[in-house]
Image: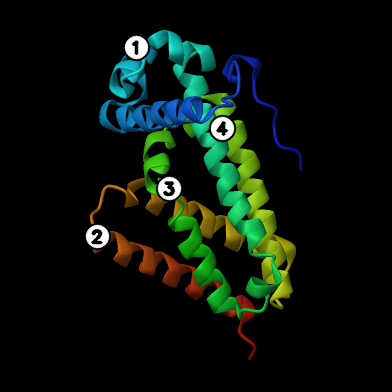
Amino acid sequence: MNKPPIPPHLMMRKQPKQLRTRKLIETIFASTSALVIERGFAAVNTNAIAKHANVDITSLYQFFPNKEAILYAIADRWLEHVRAVCQRFQEEAYQALDWRAFFLRLNHEVNTIPEHGTHYASLSTLWETLPEFAELERYHQQWIVAFLCGELRRFGATAPAQTLQERVLYLYLSTDGIAEVMGTYPEPTASALRQLQYQTWEYHLAPLLDKQ
């Protein structure tokens, strides 16, 4: 399963090397996400991003050719972070957990990735409107489904492959739906939603994993 290459028109023009420019990129990312949530994708342009970030527009263009490239970089890095969390759960300490503790910890660590809710809110419409983003999300979805199906097999699930894939895909899509709005709710409502989300996972995985 190969990750799709970054389309040429969405590639960063150069990578930040100094601490100052890395901080500049983070500021641009934060401002872009905030503006898209506030105004919607269509109403945001690079001038608005530069103004919100309090950076010179020429500095922005040194790294990004357009607003789509900024959002693609945000999406790509964020989804890579999610996959990195999953890969960390293949370490011995996590593999020793029982299935309930394993998936509870996994849900918690993904949900607490910095700006996780913000990225869902700012990027959710792009998966449907821009083909390049849809391809990136499709790769990520396939990767996550394969990872989770592999973990279910490790925990002893014997259901046919199609059954596992359908169950995992349902959980993936339902979790996406909750995550899109999670960031709009204050605590403790957001915590309650996260707990209910995990209980949904537990409900659907128990028939596959609990021994009779």
- In the image, residue 144 sits, relative to residue 78, either above or below, namely below
Q: Amino acid at mark 1?
A: Asn
Give the CA distance from mark 2 to mark 1. Answer: 34 Å
Q: What residue is shown with label 4?
A: 134
Give the CA distance from mark 4 to mark 1. Answer: 26 Å
Q: Earlier in the sequence, mark 2 or mark 3?
A: 3
Point out residue 92 in the picture as x, y percentages from the top left corner: 70, 72
Q: What residue is shown with label 3?
A: 116
Point out residue 205 in the picture as x, y percentages from the top left corner: 56, 73
Q: Amino acid at mark 3?
A: His
- In the image, residue 188 sits, relative to residue 96, either above or below, namely above
Compare residues 25 and 138 and report the one nearer the observer: 25
Give the CA distance from mark 2 to mark 4. Answer: 31 Å
Q: Earlier in the sequence, mark 2 or mark 1?
A: 1
User: Could you say whether the residue bearing mark 3 is in a helix, strand or loop?
Assistant: helix
Residue 143 horizontal side relative to residue 180, left or right: right
Compare residues 173 and 40 and report the one nearer the observer: 40
Q: What residue is shown with label 1?
A: 47
Q: Amino acid at mark 2?
A: Glu
Residue 205 horizontal side relative to residue 115, left or right: right
Compare residues 92 and 143 and report the one nearer the observer: 92
Callout 1 crowding tier (Cα within 10 Å): few <14, some 14–19, many ≥20: some
Callout 4 crowding tier (Cα within 10 Å): few <14, some 14–19, many ≥20: some
